[in-house]
Amino acid sequence: MISLDDIDLSRGRFWTRPIEEREAAFALLRREQPIAFFEEPEIPWAKRGPGYYALTRHADITEASRRPGVFSSAEGVVVFDRPAASLEFFDSMINMDNPRHTRLRRIVSRRFTPRMIQNLDETIRRAAARVVDAIIDRESCDFVTEVAAKLPLTVICNMMGIAEDDHQFVADRTSVILGAGDPEYMPDRTDPGAILTAAAELSGLFRELARQRVGNPTGDLTSALVHADLDGERLTGQELGSFFGLLLQAGTETTRNAISHGLTLLTDHPDQKRLWASDYERYAATAADEIVRVASPIIYMRRTLTQDYELDAHRFSKGDKVLLYYWSANRDEHIFGAPHRFDITRQPNPHLGFGGPGPHYCLGSHLARSEITAMFRELLHRVPDIHAVGEPVRLRSGFINGIKHLRCVFRPRGTPQRSL
């Protein structure tokens, strides 16, 4: 049993609890205190703010998402205020309101339409095949580092025109940035230097890449962004750098975690794995969305009130911080029948795994779906008995629902496959 007094979303200890206990805590919040106030976490290198309200119901988060003029993104999307030294890399579109947000999104969205992603499908399929090629002669591997992380990293880096020799460099720096607070990536929680250094190194990589593309465009995404012109406007150097950072983080880590959670879910629900394998294409679209719903790779996003406002009988004041807990909304009993059941046939599935409705809905959602679909197509066709063993090593974070390591086993190529 858990009580409201036991719940403190600001304590790191809460995010090390078993998933079932966290689910019970959020279910209690949705039922008894759907807009709950918490003191801010103590972060040695960030100024502690006045506290925040946690929105846990799907309906409330949806309404807040549809009112960006009231629930602003401009003050940042994590609970603490961003250090000034980090703004060059982290001041991206997700930290903007209109009209600045609309201007940037119009420029970059041309490269992320469903039709453009459809044109990439064959490239993504080939990349997924190469990931499986690298492990298929073995009997086990770390599924996160050798499978789930490889595909989105390869796709995004290739889209940007980043040389293959730099892919691991990008992966390591991105893990440090999004793994802040986890001792594997940030051994000294009192020193943000590792994060700022990783951001600076990625910025340097992109500045050099952009410099090359100014005089020698190659048709990749970096070339398109450097030369993008919308009604006479071009992206500034800072805008290019921050979008690069956003694309690497949102386009690699979140999809990597969705794929990692996908294997754990299929392992824990062998009936769903058998069903998907029985007619892969029939269930591919709904299965990918169900993986994203249950995984909810981004646990929350912050908004800041621009004015006094009433939501669900709660009166907010101008300046209040609110955290939109997508992870909780995706388990809301009022929206999803049997929300804790993993069901690859679930329809409709109005999950908020790509953010709520409104201007900040994930620009790369179609790309993420395509990558998840391509990866599991290869796995279920070529190593159908693949399954996770042991407990996943989870990222210690209240922002990213991450899995750092996950051992998997399978029959290598040339040996009879076990039945699903």
Image (cartoon, rainbow, N blue to C red):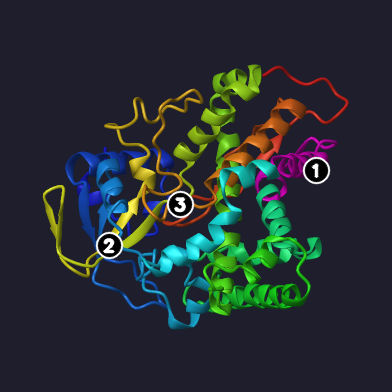
- Earlier along the polypeptide chain: callout 1 or callout 2? 2
Q: Is residue 413 above or below residue 364?
A: above
| Residue at which label 1 appears | 130
Q: Position of residue 85 (x, y in %)?
A: 48, 83
Q: Nearer the viewer, residue 216 or 393?
A: 216
The magenta segment is: 121-150
Identify the secondary structure beneath mark 3. loop
Identify the secondary structure beneath mark 1. helix
- Horizontal arrangement in the rendering, residue 346 relative to residue 223 (left or right): left
Q: Nearer the viewer, residue 306 or 317?
A: 306
How far apart marks 2 and 3 lie (CA) works out to 22 Å
Task: Report the quarter where the N terminus lies.
Answer: top left
* Viewer-nearest of discs 1 and 2: 2
Q: Nearer the viewer, residue 399 or 44?
A: 399
| Residue at which label 2 appears | 69
Q: Is residue 317 above or below residue 139?
A: below
User: For the stretch drawn in magenta, what is the main secondary structure?
Assistant: helix
Report crowding for label 2: few under 14, some 14 to 19, many 20 or more residues within 10 A (C-alpha).
some
Report crowding for label 3: few under 14, some 14 to 19, many 20 or more residues within 10 A (C-alpha).
many
Instruction: Quadrant for residue 173, please give it.
Output: bottom right
Identify the secondary structure beneath mark 2. loop
